[in-house]
Amino acid sequence: MTTALPSTDLAIPILPSRCVSDTLAFYKRLGFDGSAHAFDNGYAILTRERVEIHFFTHRDLVPSESWAGCYIRVMDVDSYYRACASSGLPRTGIPRMDVLEDKPWGLREFAVVDPDGNLIRIGQVIAR
């Protein structure tokens, strides 16, 4: 896998994973693409359009005690929501997915908690 150089500054979250192959399978269900790193199969890089998330192996991770997460700001949150909703995630427990809502702070967003307890919020700025 080759990664193109970004045309702007970029921050990439690096989140814990108990098992990289399980993490890859989960995020592929959400519309991401990627693989374990060629030089370290305990590290994975996943992308969807211009979004990139990295994962490192943390075998002792307890999902219900995880504080890891990130916010992904996108231009079309509805397409991300449709892709994630098609995975059939439940609304409670770990993993889970929240509903898409317009928030009072000016963002349209939803959240996914992956099997490792990572909280991924995905949203877009909405016009006021």
Image: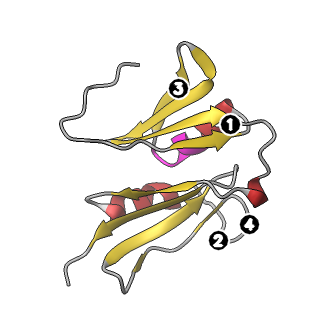
Q: Is residue 47 left or right of residue 106?
A: right
Residues at marks 4 and 1, CA–CA distance in whole angstroms: 18 Å
The disc at residue 35 is 3
Residues at marks 4 and 2, CA–CA distance in whole angstroms: 7 Å
The location of residue 3, given as percent across then percent down, is 34, 24
Q: Amino acid at mark 2?
A: Arg
Precedes in sequence: disc 3 or disc 2? 3
- The residue at 66%/30% (across/down) is 21
The reply to whether the C-beta atoms of the residues labelled 3 and 2 are less than 8 Å apart is no
Q: How many labels sit on residues? A: 4
Disc 1 marks which residue?
Answer: 22
**Secondary element at tag 3:** strand
Which mark's residue is nearer the viewer, 3 or 2?
3
The location of residue 106, given as percent across then percent down, is 30, 80
The location of residue 68, given as percent across then percent down, is 61, 54
Disc 2 marks which residue?
Answer: 91
Asked whether residue 28 is drawn in magenta, I would say yes
Question: In the image, which residues are magenta?
Answer: 26-31
Q: Is residue 4 above or below residue 92?
A: above
Residue nearest the viewer, comparing 10 with 104: 10
Q: Amino acid at mark 1?
A: Asp
Quarter location, residue 64: bottom right
- The residue at 62%/33% (across/down) is 56
Disc 4 marks which residue?
Answer: 93
Q: Amino acid at mark 3?
A: Ser
Residues at marks 3 and 4, CA–CA distance in whole angstroms: 26 Å
In this view, the residue farthest toward the top is 39
Q: Main secondary structure of the magenta part?
A: helix
Residue nearest the viewer, comparing 60 with 93: 60
